[in-house]
Image (spheres, grey):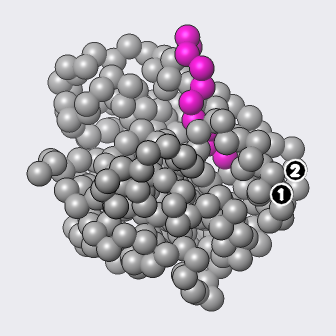
Amino acid sequence: MSKPFHFKQFSIVQDRCAMKVGTDGVLLGAWAKMPEGGQVALDIGTGTGLIALMLAQRFSEAKVKGIDIDESAAKQAEENFRTSPFAHRLSVEQVALQDFQTDEKYDSIVSNPPFFTNGILPENKQRQLARHFTDFSLELLFDKVSTLLAAQGIFAIIMPISEQENILRIAKENGLHCQESCVVYPNPNKAAKRILLSFSFQKRESENSTLFSHLERVEKRFQLIGIVGVLRGSLVGIQAPLYRFRSSQFAQVFFFACRKGANI
């Protein structure tokens, strides 16, 4: 059984989920936006509930709903929501995206979707659903988002950078315009692997930025339980147990998330 993953105000139990806590989810949870006055958010493919929990923590008035096609993942997310301080603002539903029905319009929608389109499928059906476009597609995702997003809402996604042009094309076909992008490099000497993208119905010039997720050297055996991060010129206390992080890269992503306001 995998050990719980502890953040500052909540913990993630992940023994029943195919996909565990990873850098992509933490980056998206820290980077996703909520428009001013926004009150409701949707996490598509919530898995453990990590991103939904990060949104609930960052936006203290927001109600966040997670959906997932996998029964075990939905139950795991429900468990993690129930034990968090934000339980009254969190909900989860086991449902395929194409079958999800609601009259709600969401101010913020996030998704860390599957992204393998070919290759050998893993034997584990849960992992197939979580990582491969088997019963899911980007076309379906953007089509559904265009019906669920509020007029001033923001949709955020993280994907392999190789999918950027395809994503921009599909978004445009659904009336969504790129508002911001952030290219993620493992380190300054390697090619970019991921890109964070946000979309809305408004047309404006896109803001572009770059993240080197491993710029600072962080020792693999970092033993500090409490550290102090700098956020917009002020000191913010961070209480996450870094010794649970499996790699120096993941620890560096933690620092990025703190700087972006996740306060995880």
Pointer 2: residues within 10 angstroms few (<14), some, or many (20+)?
few
As displayed, is residue 20 above or below residue 211? Answer: below
Residue located 26% across and 40% down the image: 240
Report helix, strand or loop for mark 2.
Answer: loop
Name the front one of labels 1 and 2.
Answer: 1
Q: Relative to the observer, which residue lies in front, 91 or 48?
A: 48
- What residue would you read off at disc 1? 172
The residue positioned 43% from the left and 70% from the top of the image is 68
Distance, label 1 to label 2, CA atoms, is 13 Å
Q: Give the range drawn in magenta.
A: 188-197
For label 2, the residue is 204
The percent position of residue 182, horizontal first and vertical second, equals: 65, 36
Q: Where is residue 36 in the image (x, y as percent from the top left)?
A: 67, 62
The amino acid type, in three-letter code, at marker 2 is Arg
The kind of secondary structure element at disc 1 is: helix
The residue at 69%/31% (across/down) is 209
Specify the amino acid type for callout 1: Lys
Magenta part, dominant SS: loop
